Image: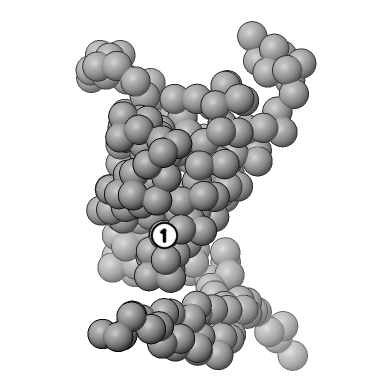
Amino acid sequence: MSETVETHTPHILKVSFKGKKTKNPDGTETVIPAREPVIVTLPVPTFDEILTQCTKPIIRDYIVRLVQADIADTMENVIRTTEGDTFTQANVNLDLITLENLALVPEAERRGGGIAKETWAAFGESYVQVMTREFAKEITVTQATNAAKVLTARLAPVKSNKPAISRLMHRLNSYYAAAGAEAQESFAEIYSFLTKKAEELLAVSEDAAADAF
């Protein structure tokens, strides 16, 4: 009797929804309750099954395109989040985009890199609008604009500046609380990513940072 080879493993996907608030002409608000979460089990190909399917040119090309897109997205993110006009073909660090280095990228950073550029740009605009409207007595337009630039750069410009990170997180929490349900839903992934990223950066001890040199 031949042994059964598993070709797929189950992956549980849970999709949650948030409630919304809409303003009525009379100034009152109508609360639209959140939909019930949707939970589905997806059959995900095993490693052996992926290797088997790679004998088909269309599957092989699909996987190659995924890797190519990840390489391009990773390098674009590095270029966009590094201050100064220093990148040329001659000095770009190609070691950053080896398959091994890509595989070692933390999941939180990978999710952040997967957020569309348009979403990051819209978040930056929303941040400046909300902060200068709701906190005009505390924050200038310049401060809000500068903060938006750092936040949309995934905190890279201040990754070693813990006081700046702490202040930015305080500002981000204030923004998110005042932004309203629609913005909260639109930028929930960015908020989660930045919060997680800040926690990781703040958790790095001074001794650990020194060990890198």
Residue at 46%, 29% in the rendered image: 156
**Residue type indicated by callout 1:** Ala
Between 122 and 115, the residue placed more toward the observer is: 122
Res. 35 in view: yes
Residue at 56%, 41% in the rendered image: 169
Left or right side of 47 for 117? left
Q: Where residue 128 sits: x, y (%)?
A: 32, 44
Q: Give the quarter of the figure containing the N terminus.
A: bottom right
Q: Dot 1 lies on which element? A: loop
Q: Where residue 213 sits: x, y (%)?
A: 64, 9
How many labels, in total? Answer: 1
Q: Quadrant of the rendered structure where residue 86 is?
A: top left
Q: Where residue 111 sits: x, y (%)?
A: 48, 53
Residue at 58%, 70% in the rendered image: 46
- Kindly identify which residue carries mark 1: 179
Between 7 and 121, the residue placed more toward the observer is: 121
Q: Is residue 11 above or below residue 140?
A: below
